Image (spheres, helix red, strand yellow):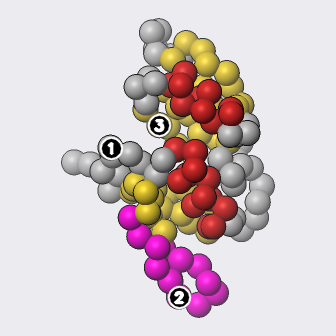
Amino acid sequence: MHIQFAELPVFDQDRAKAFYIDNLGCEVAADAPMGPGGWRWIELRLPGATTTLHFIRRKDDAPSDEPVLVLVDDDVEGTVEALRVNGVEIVTELQEAPWQPGRTTAEFRDSEGNRMVIGS
């Protein structure tokens, strides 16, 4: 069993698409019109992953209180530094995960205010 895609609530699809391409190296898997109103079906693929990220409509631009996605990375420190250099808000600095000693985690916000966890 595997997850085909993860849904991310977004307010501005173009802003979110640019964020994930520019900051996490995502590639566009799909970008097609989806009914009236200009909303599109957008899927982004993380480098080396089979799972795609899909944007769902959020009613406003209020940031999320809790993390909406957990990313696993071999170089958490390097990725966090690259995000920081690009001006991405780091919510929680690198630390050992309290629930799993030896695992490093940090949190950041994407362009839509979604809180994300990145861990080793």
Looking at the image, is 77 positioned above or below residue 85?
above
Residue at figure coordinates x 53%, y 77% from the top left: 40
The amino acid type found where label 2 is placed reads Gly
Name the secondary structure under disc 2.
loop
Q: Point out the tag, 1 or 2, that comes first from the N-terminus.
A: 2
Give the residue number, with chain letter if any, for mark 1. 48
The x and y percentages for residue 43 are: 44, 64
| Magenta residue check for 57 | no
> Mark on residue 71?
3
Contact? badges 2 and 3 (CB < 8 Å)? no
Please tell me which residue is depicted at 43% across the width and 57% down the height of the picture.
27
Q: Which residue is drawn at 55% across and 12% down?
A: 96
Point out which mark residue 24 bears: none
Foreground residue among 109 and 9: 109
Q: Residues within 10 Å of mark 2 (few under 14, many from 20)?
A: few
Q: Which of marks 1 and 2 is in front?
A: 1
The Cα–Cα distance between marks 3 and 1, rounded to whole angstroms, is 12 Å
Which range is magenta? Answer: 29-41
Amino acid type for the residue under numbered disc 1: Gly
Looking at this view, name the residue that lies furthest to the top. Answer: 101
Contact check, label 3 and label 1, Cβ < 8 Å: no
Q: Distance between the residues labelled 2 and 3?
A: 30 Å
User: Would you call the spot at circle 1 few (<14 residues within 10 Å), some (14-19), or many (20 or more)?
Assistant: few
Disc nearer the start of the sequence (2/3) = 2
Residue 32, x across and y down, in percent: 46, 79
Q: What residue type is labelled 3?
A: Leu
Determine which of the numbered discs, if any, sits on residue 35 in the image: 2
